[in-house]
Image (cartoon, helix red, strand yellow):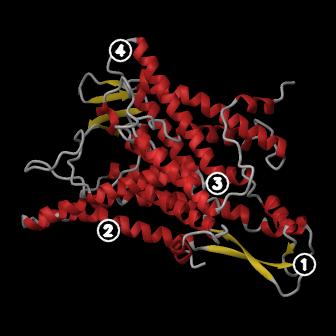
């Protein structure tokens, strides 16, 4: 029988450091990767030979979720990595592939197959983008197509290696870092960019056009005494702030399990089980599944005979608006977020169709988030049995109970499975609500960014900061 673990020798990988890295070096590597990511996401450094720059405004949701920038080497972003993770989670969670994730051998097989599937998906997705017309070459000859496909796939492989560098040499993970960086960049642009929306390059506004930045729009309306128009740019700014505050507040909700050292009396700690027990992973996976579904439906859509600006398929129809494909009917319409429905409600322009769209999108997000949350607990070592073994290995026990992993597991079983379901449902519902507000960077983008930065903050606090800059130590109150 073929040993899957032998495949690891042939896959591109970043070796783990042979010594423990200081905090400053981890911070340095994280910064280097972030700079490389932004460089390869720019049209100057990351532009793909054979592709027009005008396609860079397509698939805004996919770009946000996958940390990608269309028309550059970062077009695929983290898509292949996340999609391979979804596929394997479904196979392992449903026992189609019977691997025990607590076993080191099966865990290594899982990691190797996930990387192999991600590499294959780099080429599959690159081919789909090019042949499906979503990223058409400037010429339709096969040589140019192959060159574009290889460049896109190469960009996907670079992202995989950058993710490994951050995971092994930096702080956090590359996946989270790229998502947070992309969303933060979009929020900043949405607030302050003076450029006109839909333009190639930065074109300053004229009498017949408005800037992207909502702050500049508000100032223009104030100068022109158009006070009734201020609500349109002001509402996204207020929604962004409200969504941010709600997410920060919910991050602090947790259940604390008291623990005591079995060898030393009078000393103990608390093991916090947060409401969002699986963090933002369920939302990332749910949106990745939805984005891939939207991508496929866009690729297979054909031009409509009735409307030249409309493309339709069995999954629904799309209309091109400002270089973007907006769903207008079909299944894909009801599985996409009605961004800005809050504005429609305030202006009394909401329709029954729009409300039904909001309900179906919310239902989809909640169900998917719950399913992925449960699967993630089982496949990532966050189940009650794994946590009980961690607590026992630290020489700790729950006061009033014997020092036995089986006893601790029974106690944790009262909390972890319900938290996996309740936390998944809560973060799915919060993501859907955040999208309805029309917040800058999308509500889901803010949700992901805040949870990523919060988790990064928690990880940094656990680092040894003796050699860190005094400003960093002061911010972390060390």
Judged left or right of residue 274, residue 187 is: left
Question: Looking at the image, is mark 3 or mark 4 earlier in the sequence?
Answer: 4
* Residue positioned 63% across, 64% down in the render: 459
* x, y percent for residue 477: 57, 79
Instruction: Name the mark nearer the viewer: 3 or 1.
Output: 1
Residue that badge 3 annotates: 373
* x, y percent for residue 139: 33, 16
Question: Looking at the image, is mark 3 or mark 1 earlier in the sequence?
Answer: 1
* Residue positioned 70% across, 42% down in the render: 15
Of residue 12 and residue 323, the one placed in the foreground of this image is 12
Residue that badge 2 annotates: 238
Q: CA distance from mark 4 to mark 1?
A: 71 Å
Question: Looking at the image, is mark 2 or mark 4 earlier in the sequence?
Answer: 4
Instruction: Name the mark nearer the viewer: 3 or 2.
Output: 2
Identify the image quadrant of residue 478: bottom right
Residue 348 can be seen in this image: no
* Residue positioned 36% across, 51% down in the render: 338
Residue that badge 4 annotates: 140
Judged left or right of residue 196, residue 108 is: right
* Residue positioned 18% across, 60% down in the render: 217
């Amino acid at each position: 029988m073929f040993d899957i673990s032998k495949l690891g020798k042939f896959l591109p990988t970043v070796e783990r450091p042979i010594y423990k890295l200081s905090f400053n070096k981890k911070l340095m590597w994280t910064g280097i990767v972030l700079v490389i990511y932004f460089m390869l996401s720019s049209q100057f450094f990351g532009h793909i030979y054979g592709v027009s720059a005008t396609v860079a405004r397509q698939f805004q949701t996919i770009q946000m979720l996958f940390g990608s920038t269309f028309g550059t080497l970062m077009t695929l972003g983290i898509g292949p990595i996340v999609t391979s993770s979804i596929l394997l989670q479904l196979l392992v969670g449903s026992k189609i592939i019977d691997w025990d994730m607590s076993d080191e051998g099966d865990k290594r097989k899982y990691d190797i197959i996930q990387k192999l599937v991600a590499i294959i998906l780099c080429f599959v997705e690159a081919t789909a983008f090019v042949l499906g017309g979503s990223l058409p070459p400037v010429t339709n000859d096969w040589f140019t197509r192959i060159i574009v496909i290889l460049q896109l796939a190469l960009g996907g492989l670079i992202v995989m290696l950058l993710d490994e560098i951050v995971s092994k040499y930096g702080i956090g993970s590359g996946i989270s870092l790229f998502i947070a960086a992309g969303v933060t960049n979009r929020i900043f642009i949405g607030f302050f960019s003076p450029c006109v929306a839909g333009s190639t390059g930065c074109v300053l506004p004229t009498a017949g056009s408005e800037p992207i930045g909502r702050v500049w729009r508000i100032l223009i309306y104030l100068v022109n005494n158009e006070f009734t128009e201020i609500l349109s740019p002001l509402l996204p700014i207020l929604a962004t702030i409200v969504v941010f505050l709600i997410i920060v507040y919910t991050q602090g909700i947790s259940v604390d399990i008291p623990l005591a050292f079995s060898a030393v009396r009078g000393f103990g700690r608390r093991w916090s089980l947060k409401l969002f027990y699986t963090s933002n992973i369920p939302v990332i996976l749910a949106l990745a599944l939805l984005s891939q579904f939207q991508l496929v439906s866009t690729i297979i859509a054909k031009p409509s005979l009735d409307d030249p600006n409309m493309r339709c398929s069995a999954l629904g129809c799309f209309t091109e608006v400002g270089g973007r494909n907006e769903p207008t009917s079909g299944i894909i319409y009801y599985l996409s977020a009605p961004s800005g429905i809050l504005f429609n409600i305030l202006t009394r322009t909401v329709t029954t169709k729009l409300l039904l769209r909001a309900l179906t999108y919310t239902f989809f997000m909640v169900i998917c988030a719950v399913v992925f949350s449960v699967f993630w607990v089982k496949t990532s070592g966050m189940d009650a049995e794994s946590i009980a073994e961690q607590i026992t290995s630290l020489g700790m026990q729950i006061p009033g109970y014997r020092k036995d992993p089986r006893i601790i597991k029974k106690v944790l079983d009262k909390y972890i499975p319900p938290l996996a379901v309740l936390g998944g449902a809560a973060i799915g519902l919060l993501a859907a609500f955040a999208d309805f507000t029309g917040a800058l960077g999308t509500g889901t983008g803010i949700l992901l960014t805040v949870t990523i930065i919060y988790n990064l903050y928690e990880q940094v606090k656990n680092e040894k900061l003796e050699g860190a800059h005094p400003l960093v130590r002061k911010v972390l109150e060390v």
